[in-house]
Image: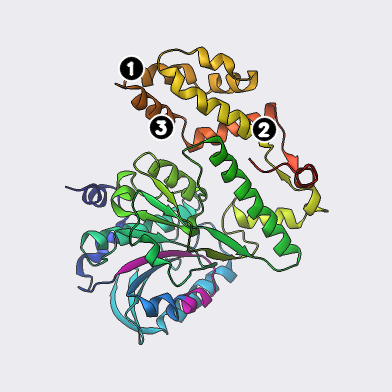
Amino acid sequence: MTAAEKYLKTYAEAEIAALANFPAQKWNFCLSIPAYGEPGDFVDRLNSGLMLKHAVLLIVVINQPDSHENTEHQSANSELHQHIRGLGSRSWHNGNLELIACRGSPSAILVVDRFSSHKIPIKQGVGLARKIAADLACALVQRRQILSPWLFCSDADSHLPDDYFLAAATGSGAALVYPFRHRCENDALGRATALYERFLHHYVDGLKAAGSPYGFHTIGSIMAVHCQHYAMVRGFPKRAGGEDFYLLNKLAKTGAIISLNRPTIEITARISQRVPFGTGPAVEKIVAMTDPDTTFKLHNPRIFAALKEWLEVIPTLATTSDGLLRLNTSSRNLLSAMGVEKAIDHCRQHSRSDPGFEKQMHTWFDGFRTMKYLQGLRATAFPDVAVGELTSTGEKAG
């Protein structure tokens, strides 16, 4: 039994049971998008572009949190559902799933209704919406109705390039992460979004410069996940935010996360409160600042220098802990509080070689612990620096 078969049998969401009498059709690719209070333009964009060029099954999970009685979003969800129905004919229906065969196209749209009833528990949010879609895609890959093993994930505000699917034709590893940029106008929203994008690149560039194996972007709209690896980590975490970060963090322990050089996904600049944290809420805070172009803060580059020093020490710890003494006091205190001594002992006992020890240490000191370590350095030793100060000193991020 494959990892995917085990996962689908034990951990997948209930929606996959409705596929029992699903039509025996095949598509080359599957793309999943969660939609909460979204207009239908993203479906039109895909239906007139990628879905005409390729045989695509687009899975749209129209969702709403169970504690939100926002009539505006409820109305938008209903309008989106009706809009999708108008793009073709319904070829299948079971429970809260509905398949729309797109008119004049080799593609179809599988709509999952999680807004009119069976709303998403608020604490599970977008993570559950993504998991439902990816579970359905994984099931159809196993049934060989989706020919590509890659589960493509994106969002309604993303503009996918014409060669979007072709990037995975020769791809390998556990996940692919696309390059991205935001579409920013020269207004308050655009400038705020550009600053936040700089913040995102500053962080990932710093991780890469430090030599971290977790130096990749963790944005839900720009990734594709291999079906078998997705199953190995039991799918998307059911969280109201950060589900992309935690999924990729787990996937990095099963295989490579490949940061693609092209094609680039463009993301519409907008303020959004659909998730508790992330780009939308961050941009809203930046817009409210008096002078964000000079006062918005980025991570102090010195935290990445400290991270680099720690990562360079790891290989030496297989036989002796003397390397820890070379680290600055803040680093040693933070790592000790995180249980580094116990982790070192465990990795020594469970590895047969120095490379095996190093791999186990990087499994322990994963993307989450890396983030906590850097947050600790920011709080105790190297506070954030205003973007204007970094620009004036010519100091580069990372």
Residue at (51, 22) in percent of width and height: 313
Marks 2 and 1, how far apart at CA = 33 Å
Residue 363's tag is 3
Helix, strand or loop at mark 2: helix
In the picture, the disc for residue 349 is 1
Q: Residue 38 lies in what quarter of the image?
A: bottom right
Q: Residue at x 25, y 52 (%)?
A: 8
The amino acid on which the numbered mark 2 sits, given as a three-letter code, is: Arg
Circle 1: element type? helix
Q: Is residue 95 visible?
A: no
* Res. 97 visible in picture: yes
Query: Which of the marked residues, 2 or 1, is nearer the chain's N terminus?
Result: 2
Q: Per the image, is 29 magenta?
A: yes
Q: Amino acid at mark 3?
A: Thr
Q: Which residues are magenta?
A: 28-45
Q: Residue at x 64, y 64 (%)?
A: 270
In the picture, measured across the screen, residue 340 lies left or right of residue 171, that is right
Horizontal and vertical percent position of residue 16: 28, 60
Residue 377 higher or lower than 342, as above or below: below
Across and down, in percent, residue 297 comes to: 73, 44
